[in-house]
Amino acid sequence: MWDVDEIRIHIGRHTSDYSIAIVDIDYLIRFCMRFSKNEINSIINNITDFFKSTLVQDSYIWKSSGDEYLILYNNRRTCEVEKILKDIRKAFKKQRFARDCNREYSNITITFSAGIAEYSSENAIPEEVIKKATVALFQAKALRRDRIIRSIEAKKEGCNRILYDPSLEIETIIGEHGKIGSVSNPVLYKGALLWEPQAIDIDGDDNLYIVDQNNHSILRCDGKYVRRIVGCGEYGYDGDQGLGENASLNKPTGIAILDNYLYITDTGNDAVRRFHLKTNLIDTAVGMGIPGYSGDGDVASKALLNKPGGAVADHNGNLYINDIANNVIRKVDTKNIVTTYAGTGEYGYEGDHGPSVNATFAEIYGIGIDKCNGNIYVADYFNHCIRFIEVSTGTIRTIAGNGTSGYEGDGLEPLKAKLNRPVAVCTDIEGNIYVAESGNSCIRVIARNENKIYTLVGDGVPGTGTSGNVNCFRLANPNGLAVNSKNQLYILDGSNNRICMIDLNNIRRQ
């Protein structure tokens, strides 16, 4: 994505003190959908010219092929860069980048998010500094955007990590850390490259499906090859009633497999698309492409969603959708009727031990399901906890996390532990619960027979690794989990643009 060799040249002799900022324009794709291609080019040129005009001494800028910018600041620490970017952000909001478009939307304000990292002993090469800045950017985007986040080096010794099994091996099977790309034709696992993948799921034949968000596409992995099955690679909202590979999506976030259908939360389009796995045809199943919160008690096609995220399906044929911006979970039953299954729509942390519809959440970024009994697990992001909805009673309760962010509690009861921004949750065939924590860059496991929580992989510090022992392997913003019929756990390592795998059958507990 970035020309690291060119960046290295501009760093020059300033290797002892430099910072890198990765800037992402908030919802630029949605904003630009109002304009023609020529007008979009004009808007992007105006944005680029603006950032160039803000450069200070010994700073340089590069633009990606999408909507991101990399700014190199020589001789400056992250605290200085943060102040510079905050001033830039104030000026940015006053700009009218669509001023030349002669449309009613020409005066709309847009914002940006940014992640910052600096050279350090752990970030000894530009690639590592870029990676840390990218992780910080992801965190800024998760915090409702319009944020600037500095990468703060965590201390490994600052947590009480207890590995569930220090002898476990982990393997990278798809993607390559530090590289981004796309899949257009079938490629072998090792040759596939991803770009900000967001979710994974597995069908009854153990085929793996990947939401490749920044490529606006869905991939299928059959054990040998990776194929693009939905999405043409360009953002948009069209293609219904045609082949899925020709359709356009807009930053999809989640998937769920139900019967012969693959349901896709088309987040940027505020809709859920439906792809038939046999005919390869696509249509819109839920939503109208307009953000909102309505439609309960009516057919799914008339509902309004607002940034649908994760999705799961139960064994009875019901679909559950994480409606992020509305702070609720919506349910589509077998009669295609939409209801609110959990949440009042208010932001908060209330309702435990009562009906799930009376509960409040602090943004749900992932939901999981026990496919045997249909019980729902909720990754309550800013409440730093895992909530549990019992399907037989409809009641909700917290099962892990004490509501405070941190990295503590390994070896203790899950309710005594501190989690940090959980984003995904799933169960294995034995009922153990796995949690992906973006804030701790780790996977925790709640051992069913012990009622205790442990770290499976990761140590609280974003990083990387190739293959080997979990004791020295690091993740960066893990945001997807799935277990196949062979009891193998797939981990979507988001900022590293890869899929890792752990064979849970090899776990040896003392």
Image (cartoon, grey):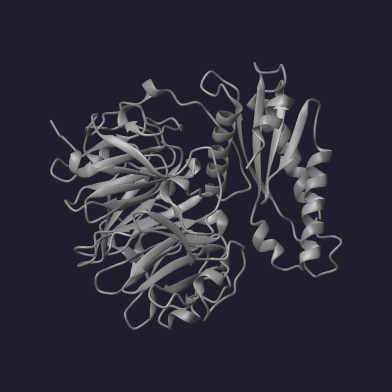
Q: Position of residue 272 (x, y in %)?
A: 47, 70
Q: Position of residue 420 (x, y in %)?
A: 40, 39
Picture residue at 47% right of the left edge, 47% below the top: 191
Which quadrant does the N terminus fall into? top right
Residue 98 visible, this angle: yes
Q: Nearer the viewer, residue 175 or 317?
A: 175
Q: Nearer the viewer, residue 61 or 455?
A: 61
Residue 399 vertical position relative to residue 262 in the rendered view, above or below: above
Picture residue at 71% right of the left edge, 35% below the top: 71
Q: Relative to 249, is 66 on the left or the right?
A: right
Q: Relative to 508, is 437 on the left or the right?
A: right
Q: Position of residue 353 (x, y in %)?
A: 25, 57
Q: Relative to 1, is 169 on the left or the right?
A: left
Quadrant of the rendered image containing residue 163:
top left
Picture residue at 82% right of the left edge, 58% below the top: 42
Residue 224 vertical position relative to residue 475 in the rendered view, above or below: below
Quadrant of the rendered image containing residue 130:
top right
Residue 363 visible, this angle: no
Which quadrant does the C terminus fall into? top left
Residue 50 vertical position relative to residue 285 in the rendered view, above or below: above
Quadrant of the rendered image containing residue 100:
bottom right
Q: Position of residue 369 (x, y in %)?
A: 28, 60
Residue 460 vertical position relative to residue 244 in the rendered view, above or below: above
Q: How many marks?
A: 0
Q: Nearer the viewer, residue 316 or 390?
A: 316
